[in-house]
Image (spheres, rainbow, N blue to C red):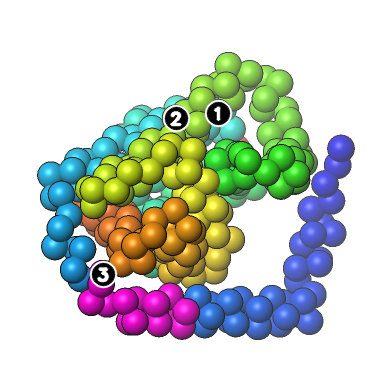
Amino acid sequence: MHLDLDYLKSFYENRKIRVVLKILILVLTLFVIATYGWMLYVNFDEIGKYFYRINLPLFIFAIIFSFGVALIVGKRLQIMVKIVTNSNISFKDSLKILFSANSLGHVTPANLGEFSKIEFIRNKTGCSRKKCLIVPLSERILDVAILAVFAFATNIIMLCFFLLLTSIIATYSMYKKIVNNKFGIIKIVLLSIVHKIGIVFSLMFIIYSLDVNIGFVQASNILGVSLLAGIISYLPGGWGTREFSMGFLLQGAITNIGIALLIPLLYALMLGIMIIVGFVVFYKSIKIDNSKATKK
């Protein structure tokens, strides 16, 4: 199966299509900000009432647990860089790349963090941009595929659609690498699954800190849809779109609207703390030097 990237590139570079996409993105952004902002404003007192009832030790544990989950992603990145570029980077370097790219990605729109990851990898390995592109592209493919399983596990039609869509791109970008290093790909997929299970438990710990019970399947459905919404959003880091989706879905699982709207805010706070700490610890030692990049 062949995916014509030149056709896709020319399709996106069409000026009329770009204008339509920008208008749609702007409308979606304004809708999300206005709707979610209004929901928070109307229910501000209700949210504040439950904020002071948080089980603080359990919430702190959720934050610490999220750092452990991030280490899994760092290990996955290290293995993937080895497979794609045939270059060895240390686990510490993979964490530097991960937190540096995530720090940029959560304060800039249009997934610029993914593009910065290409430059960080290029700087460390000396590989061409085209080859380094495979790493974040493959990561995103795996993430979307696994999140689709979590999000649509109870809807076979939607699940098959997402898996078909992602498998086409995965076949194009990773086919030779899969054939040449099957064991490495298996490790990457397993780490990706463990990572996604880990972030579901992070959400569950936050929910439990408010003395609310929720099952793993239900939590994974909610988080899967919310994170997919964040991935396709052009808002910086998916902020707002992810929380809006999560708050909307939680209202169907939790009858108390104050708690349902508070949980996404606590999840965003947990992510924010992790990103800030990761930025302080790792970002300062990453520098891009174009002179080191070669056509490797």
Instruction: Look at the picture and state if 200 lies above or below 48.
Output: above
Instruction: Look at the picture and state if 23 lies above or below 65.
Output: below
Distance CA(mark 3)–CA(mark 1): 38 Å
Nearer-the-camera pick, 30 or 53: 53
Residue that appears at 58% across and 81% down: 26
- What residue type is disc 3 on? Ile
Badge 1: few (under 14), some or many (20 or more) residues near its Cα, within 10 Å?
some
What secondary structure characterizes most of the magenta part? Answer: helix
* Foreground disc of the pair 2, 3: 3
Residue 275 counted in the magenta span? no
Looking at the rendered image, the quarter that the N terminus falls into is: top right
- What residue type is disc 1 on? Val
User: What residue is disc 1 on?
Assistant: 189
Q: Quadrant of residue 10?
A: bottom right
Query: Residue 29, position in %: x, y?
Result: 53, 77
Badge 2: few (under 14), some or many (20 or more) residues near its Cα, within 10 Å?
some
